[in-house]
Amino acid sequence: MNNKRIVVLIVLATFFLTGCANIGVTPVKRIEPFETQDFLMGTVISQRVYGDNAQKAAQDVLDKLKEIERSMTIITPGGEINKLNSEAGKNWVKLSSETLYVLEKARKFSELSGGAFDATIGPLVKAWGVFTENPRVPSKEEIERLLRLVDYKDININKTDSSARLEKPGQIVDLGGIAKGHAGDEAIKIYKKYGIKSAYANLGGNVVVLGSKPDGNPWRVGIQNPRAENGVYIGIVPVTDKAVVTSGDYERFFEEDDKKYHHILNPKTGYPADSGLISTTIIADASIDADALSTATFVLGLEKGKELVENLEGVEAIFITDNKEIYVTQGLKNNFIFVDESKEFKYVEKR
Ligand code: AMP
Ligand code: MG
């Protein structure tokens, strides 16, 4: 994995005193953030952290992300999840409490989504090779054969001795749809440990915010326009202490014979999900939940995805369909700011 830091911008906490100080007006204190952008977990990680220990906290977050990637990835060798996979159909494997926690969450959301999210999607993810140099469209026969290995119910977990086992040989757990979400929660924990009250981190589309902006206003998180270049938004959600996680067909894909194949697979068909959605965004307290749900709702489609989210306490969603319509859940109706400069999208409020 390419760990190379690509940009490091250090702005140490500076205090800006207005020129009015000497004529008896209270000086205005403005704290600058520490900002950094790094390449990790196969994506760009941006952090904007306010407070005395901002730089140290941001570095600790990067160290933690590296550790999570090492233990949970299936892209590079080594790591706990790879060990679990290599013992599939054979032995129980001891896992750290952290990896076991993420695996349990993955199984829970697999169940909750009726298998739209399925943590055992690994054999198909590998066959499509979307993360490799040579992605390809597997044959129908290969997909059918590999689909028999996809079943989250085959993840056995023993909490007493912190171990897990996959039922059938050849099964592969892939935490790619949830691990970054967990990493977001861990980032917030680290900021809090350093006494930080205000921070923003974007882990390649998984945003977490701690507190509000230093001026007391909520953070304004941009929702990516799925058909424009990175950083062009179709809307904004103001949030405090929340995770805002997006899954989209534009995040990773390859093209063959003029057809686009993206990285979110439908565990029922073995092919890239084709539910009529091109992006889903979940807003929740826990980033791990938001991550699993963004992938799950992307597979489920608008109707079923909306139903799933409306039934969960404290979770909201934004859905963008392939005919460029935007839908939000009830709790977001008054909090979603539609700003589409492209004028291509339509915000459907009455649903
Ligand atoms: P995300 O970008 O969070 O939606 O996660 C997508 C990643 O999760 C993919 O790159 C795969 O590694 C994995 N994945 C793909 N399809 C599924 C699925 N249906 N359920 C669980 N994980 C999936
Ligand atoms: Mg996800």
Image (cartoon, rainbow, N blue to C red):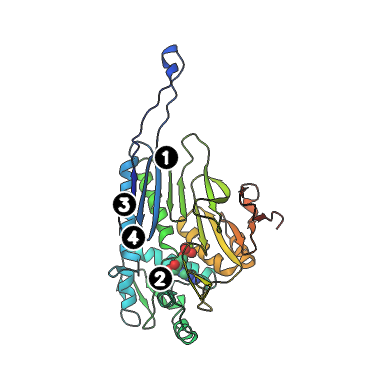
Disc 2/disc 1 C-alpha distance (Å):
34 Å
**Apparent side of residue 119 relative to residue 217 in the rendered image (left or right):** left
Instruction: Pick the residue in front: 318 or 156.
Output: 318
Q: Position of residue 214 (x, y in %)?
A: 46, 36
> What residue did someone put label 1 on?
197
Mark 3 burial class by Cα count in 10 Å: few <14, some 14-19, many 20+: few
Of marks 1 and 3, which one's residue comes earlier in the chain? 3
> What residue did someone put label 2 on?
174
Of marks 1 and 4, which one's residue comes earlier in the chain? 4
Report if the beta carbon of the residue with label 2 is closer than 8 angstroms to ligand 1.
yes
Disc 2/disc 3 C-alpha distance (Å):
26 Å
Q: Position of residue 321 (x, y in %)?
A: 62, 63
Q: Nearer the viewer, mark 2 or mark 1?
A: 2
The amino acid type of the residue labelled 2 equals Asp
Disc 4/disc 2 C-alpha distance (Å):
13 Å
Mark 4 burial class by Cα count in 10 Å: few <14, some 14-19, many 20+: many
> What residue did someone put label 3 on?
5
